[in-house]
Image (cartoon, grey):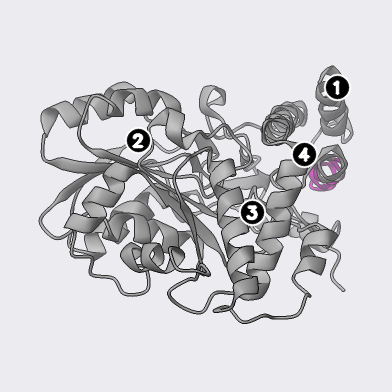
């Protein structure tokens, strides 16, 4: 059995009780027993989204939920504004283009966050914008967008507010109703600490109005079908769901409820603060501006003279700790440390001890224990 520690921005390590929950017997996904399980899972998702709206579970990756969000509220000839400051902002825009939707890209330098003022300026300049898409936590850069402040801007316009919280829900402050988010999506394999393969989506009344007015050119992700089937007794999904994964997600959401959502978010914030301190103590440079740094993943510039295989290769092959590399033009230029889900001091201490040893072995003139010392100092301060 591989005992590699996943310190990735997803998928994450999964707790034993969540894995055990998935080993239960399969039940009829059209029967009463599964209807109760599905309903409870959706209700718990709404609590984590912090919304009074109904949530729906999709058997897909987070990308499927992104496609469901866009393809159901806008069609060919209509326009959306996509904030693009990383790979997943690009993905939102690409999905819209695939469905024939006109896309205006609001480009943001990778490593920095969009400002609410920039969104406001774009909306003022074009009254035809039907929706604005924002990635809350851009894992490709380690940047968190100010979704609460953007929500305050959005309340002054008719455009729908669509937010990707795939890598932030359960690990950063998300309040769908308070922030005025019309469509919010997430994935199972990141801060929720469940296995990959499920996504969730929730829609406001305004979003449902747009859904009803849109001739969605999607079959599997047609949200009218999810609404219609969710209203049945027992509740159902329109197509065969991953029953075992839903068992696991239900258990993972139960763990969040036990920990307390606010406590869980605070833990992620502490993980992030300690990780950034440890990175700097090892003489490394953060990629994202600290003012907008993610609470779930830390992006680090590759040390001068070292390659991706030097750092990530040694961490994996010698220390059995897996970090993520850079994407697109950042490939080989950064590495990323995920600190989401069930991660706490223990996992971070192992990671930064190994990272210090790796840097020392690669010839860097550092104190290899400096990172874990800085990490401990932050945790002791609380």
Give the quadrant of residue 85.
Answer: top left
**Which comes sooner in the sequence, label 4 or label 2?**
2
- Residue 195 vs residue 312, the one in the foreground: 195
Mark nearest the camera among 4 and 2 is 4
**Which comes sooner in the sequence, label 1 or label 3?**
3
Mark nearest the camera among 4 and 3 is 4
Q: CA distance from mark 1 to mark 3?
A: 25 Å
Badge 3: how crowded within 10 Å, few (<14), some, or many (20+)?
many
**Which comes sooner in the sequence, label 1 or label 4?**
4
Residue drawn 35% across and 55% down? 69
Tell me the residue that label 4 is attached to.
259
Q: Quadrant of the C terminus?
A: top right
| Relative vertical location of residue 74 with respect to residue 234 in this rendering, above or below | above
**Which comes sooner in the sequence, label 2 or label 3?**
2
Tell me the residue that label 1 is attached to.
377
**Residue 16 at least partly seen:** yes
Find out whether the residues at labels 4 and 3 contact each other: C-beta distance under 8 Å.
no
Q: CA distance from mark 2 to mark 3?
A: 22 Å
Kindly state the secondary structure of the residue where label 2 is placed.
loop
Residue drawn 59% across and 42% down? 48
Tell me the residue that label 3 is attached to.
324
Q: Position of residue 38 (x, y in %)?
A: 59, 64
Badge 2: how crowded within 10 Å, few (<14), some, or many (20+)?
some
Kindly state the secondary structure of the residue where label 3 is placed.
strand
The magenta stretch is 353-363
Give the quadrant of residue 155.
Answer: top left
Q: Quadrant of the N terminus?
A: bottom right
Magenta portion: prevailing SS class: helix
């Amino acid at each position: 059995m591989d005992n590699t520690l996943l310190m990735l921005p997803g998928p994450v390590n999964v707790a034993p009780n969540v894995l055990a929950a998935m080993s239960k017997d399969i039940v009829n996904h059209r029967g009463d027993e599964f209807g109760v399980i599905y309903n409870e899972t959706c209700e718990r998702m709404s609590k984590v989204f912090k919304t009074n709206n109904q949530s729906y579970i999709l058997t897909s990756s987070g990308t499927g939920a992104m496609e469901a969000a866009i393809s159901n509220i806008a069609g060919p000839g209509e326009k959306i504004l996509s904030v693009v400051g990383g790979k997943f902002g690009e993905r939102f825009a690409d999905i819209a283009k695939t469905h024939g939707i006109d896309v205006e890209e609001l480009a943001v330098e990778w490593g920095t966050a969009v400002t609410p003022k920039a969104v406001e300026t774009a909306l003022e300049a074009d009254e035809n914008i039907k929706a604005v898409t924002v990635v809350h936590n851009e894992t490709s850069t380690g940047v968190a967008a100010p979704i609460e402040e953007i929500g305050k801007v959005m309340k002054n316009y008719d455009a729908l507010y669509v937010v990707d919280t795939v890598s932030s829900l359960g690990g950063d402050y998300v309040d769908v109703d308070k922030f005025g988010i019309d469509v919010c999506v997430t994935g199972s394999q990141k801060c929720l600490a469940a296995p990959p393969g499920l996504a969730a989506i929730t829609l406001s009344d305004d979003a449902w109005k747009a859904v009803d007015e849109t001739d969605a050119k999607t079959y599997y992700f047609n949200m009218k079908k999810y609404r219609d089937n969710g209203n049945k007794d027992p509740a159902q999904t329109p197509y065969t769901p991953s029953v075992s994964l839903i068992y696991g997600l239900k258990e993972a959401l139960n763990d969040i409820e036990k920990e307390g959502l606010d406590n869980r978010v605070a833990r992620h914030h502490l993980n992030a603060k300690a990780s950034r301190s440890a990175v700097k103590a090892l003489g490394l440079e953060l990629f994202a501006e600290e003012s907008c740094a993610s609470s779930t993943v830390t992006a680090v510039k590759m040390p001068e003279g070292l390659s991706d295989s030097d750092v990530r290769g040694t961490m994996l092959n010698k220390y059995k700790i897996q970090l993520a590399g850079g994407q697109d033009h950042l490939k080989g230029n950064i590495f990323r440390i995920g600190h989401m889900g069930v991660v706490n001091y223990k996992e971070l201490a192992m990671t930064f001890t190994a990272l210090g040893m790796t840097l020392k072995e690669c010839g860097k003139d550092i104190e290899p224990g400096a990172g874990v010392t800085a990490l401990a100092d932050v945790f002791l301060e609380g």
